[in-house]
Image: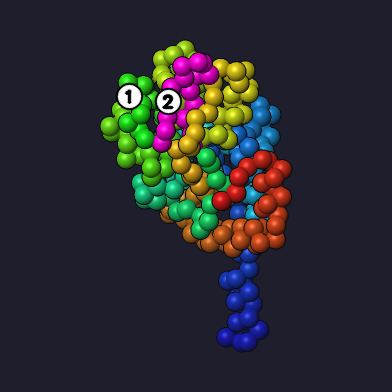
Amino acid sequence: MSISRFAFCICLLFSPLAMAGQILAVGTEFAHVFECNSDGGCNGLAVDILRALAKQNGDTISFQIYPWSRAQSMVENSQAQILIGPYKTAEREIKFSFAQKPFYQDVMAFYVRQEPKSAAWDGNYASFGEGKVAVINGWVYGPKFEPMRTSMKPTLANSLENGLNMLVAKRIDYLATNLRNSEALVAKMGLAKKVTILQPYIDKQEGYLAYCKTSCDLLRNRYDELFEQLRTSNALQEMAQRHEVRLP
């Protein structure tokens, strides 16, 4: 092989455009992170990040919102390349290849009714007494909370909106959620004077981009490199400020 031909092969091997392609990123609606309107236009921190990474790599990227369980299944079965926003757990690491670094941070907290004798919480789960706790189906709340699930036997809410309605209707006393999603929905539902946040917070969770296991290793590695460039250039901080999202 001639030197020029060898150099050409090396350039192809390491060229970002060598991995360019059609990318589908999926998830469910995460306030400020991933949102789409009825016309199909999508926005949020994850959308800005992925568009920047795809442009740098020469990819064409599209976005779709699905129920959370379906979005996870699509990436697990390589029907989509990227899952937007999951928290990392041992169970999920079996199904997906997670990005090297998270791209946002959530504060997990309990919401209660805003009334004179609202439910108590001092950081000790024994303080719940007979209070009924609800969690959102499919959500994880961090290493401090998860070991307590069995003893708490929480009620499952099908969605955050469903959980807030249950709380206001006095079907539950505590709703475990995150501030980012909840603050936006509480305002939208007009519940700002009916519910309140308890402190101390439950925990903090970090959200990632997760990739399909079977054929996405090159894409994940390349996007990890480009994400680091985004982070060190301060572009990521500017995106996060624009969308009012906490960075890790």
- Which residue sits at x=60%, y=76%? 9
Q: Position of residue 165 (x, y in %)?
A: 50, 17
**As drawn, is 16 to the left or to the right of 68?**
right
Question: What type is the residue that disc 1 sits on?
Answer: Gly
**Residue 129: mark in rendering:** 1
Residue 243 visible, this orientation: yes
Residue 78, percent across and down?
Answer: 46, 47
Q: In the image, what residue occupies the spot 49% across and 44% down?
A: 204
Residue located farthest toward the bottom when viewing the structure as drawn: 2
Please say if the residues under marks 2 and 1 sit with CB atoms less than 8 Å apart. Answer: yes
Q: Which segment did they paint magenta?
A: 108-123
Q: Is residue 58 above or below residue 119?
A: below
**Point 69% across, 45% down: residue:** 241
Instruction: Determine the residue positioned at 66% across, 26% down.
Output: 38
Q: Quadrant of residue 30?
A: top right
Residue at the extreme left of the image, as rendered: 151
Which quarter of the image is occupied by the N terminus?
A: bottom right
Q: In the image, 232: left or right of 29? A: right
Picture coordinates of residue 213 (x, y %)? 43, 53
Q: Residue 130 or 137: which is nearer the viewer?
A: 130
Amino acid under label 2?
Answer: Ala
Secondary structure type for disc 1: loop
Q: Main secondary structure of the magenta part?
A: loop
- In this view of the protein, which residue sits in the foreground, 197 or 177? 197
Residue 20 visible at all:
no
Which of marks 1 and 2 precedes in the sequence? 2
Q: Which residue is under mark 2?
A: 120
Q: Was residue 116 drawn as part of the magenta stretch in this picture?
A: yes
